Image (spheres, rainbow, N blue to C red):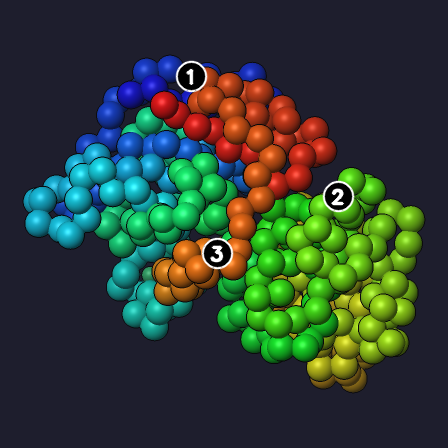
Amino acid sequence: MKAAAIERHGGPEVIEVRDYPDPRPAPGEVLVRVRACALNHRDVWVRRGMREQRLPHILGSDIAGEVASVPGGRDRLAVGTRVVLKPTLTCGRCEFCKAGQDNACVAIRLLGGAVDGGYAELIAVPRANVFPIPRNLSFVEAAAIPVVFLTAWHMLVTRADLRPGETVLVVGGASGVGSAAIQVALVRGARVLATAGSEAKRKRALELGAEHAIDHHADSISSEARRLSGGRGADVVVDHVGAATWGESLRSLARRGRFVVCGSTTGDDVTLPLRQFFGQNQTIHGAFIGTAGEFGALLRVFAAGRFRPVLDAVLPLAQAADAHRKLEQGDHFGKIVLATD
Ligand code: ZN
């Protein structure tokens, strides 16, 4: 098969399309012919060597395709079924997997992270990772779902237990996970404030349904969030930006507010104002991707047409390096997707 792989770490130029041995499915695994694979910013970190994995390595966590073979052949999953893959491999045996909390699995690995991913024509994955694509979605649209929507769903529905009528502040609302979080919050009946760094991105956040889009370069996020909530603050704040926005995000939080963090793009080191935190009965949740049960629930909402994948560009697999250059420029809105014929 053809795959866009890295044999060393570095810039986009280290991604080379070359022949690779076809994956051979182990017992219990399904061979999937990849039709589309979306990029995540994490792919850049893996490429640069900021995440550990063996080399050569095939990037790509967000994968849609069709079933090429099912070992044993007795599965209801017929060859040719259009499928989208849950992006995490989990053990199925630890206390968290048994409790349906498989995103906390003690042996969790991300496709395209610790194991080979979807910048390729074929991938073999456990049967448990394979979910049918809702009829109303294309391969490219389906590939734009897994990491960002599953993360947004886990943050808002499961960790924050978001309630109708609550106010959510989505920091970085134009990013992949931000644009998903806006949609998840709206489906839960919440009111959404978003932040974005450019006029074009604020416009897109408003088009997705955010009530206000705060300019996080020109304005104080917390002052605006308080002004727009009658001085109360946001019941839930979603932040993946990390150190650069942490303080302002925390200051935006209402009494009994829940802060959910799923990333640290601008740095890990932050301080916590303890007196505010305990004095106002606030909570911080960490969130990593989501569970198999949540993925199923999420796909049912897509099937009902209530979510839409946000797409920026579709490039052929052969242009994977160019897709990384585009991702690193940072002026895209929505997912950049690689498609194979
Ligand atoms: Zn486990």
Q: Position of residue 178 (x, y in %)?
A: 65, 52
Q: Position of residue 38 (x, y in %)?
A: 49, 37
Tell me what residue is drawn at x 75 percent, y 43 percent. 201
Which image quarter: residue 83? top left
Which image quarter: residue 7? top left
Ligand 1 closer than 8 Å to label 3 CB: no
Residue 46 visible in image: no
Label 1 amino acid?
Answer: Val
Mark 3 residue crowding within 10 angstroms, few (<14) / some (14–19) / many (20+): few
Task: Give the label on residue 201, or none.
Answer: 2
Q: Quadrant of the N terminus?
A: top left
Give the number of the mark in front: 2 or 1.
Answer: 2
The foreground one among 133 and 151 is 133
N-term mark: 2 or 1: 1
Q: Position of residue 277 (x, y in %)?
A: 75, 77
Q: How many numbered circles are shown?
A: 3
Horizontal side, residue 296 vs residue 181: left or right:
left
Reading the image, the residue beneath label 1 is: 17
Q: Position of residue 136 (x, y in %)?
A: 41, 48
Mark 1 residue crowding within 10 angstroms, few (<14) / some (14–19) / many (20+): some
Tell me what residue is drawn at x 53 percent, y 70 percent. 157
Tell me what residue is drawn at x 32 percent, y 16 percent. 19
Separation of disc 2 and disc 3 at Cα?
24 Å
Asked which secondary structure carries label 2, the reply is: helix
Ligand 1 closer than 8 Å to label 1 CB: no
Reading the image, the residue beneath label 3 is: 305
The foreground one among 290 and 267 is 290
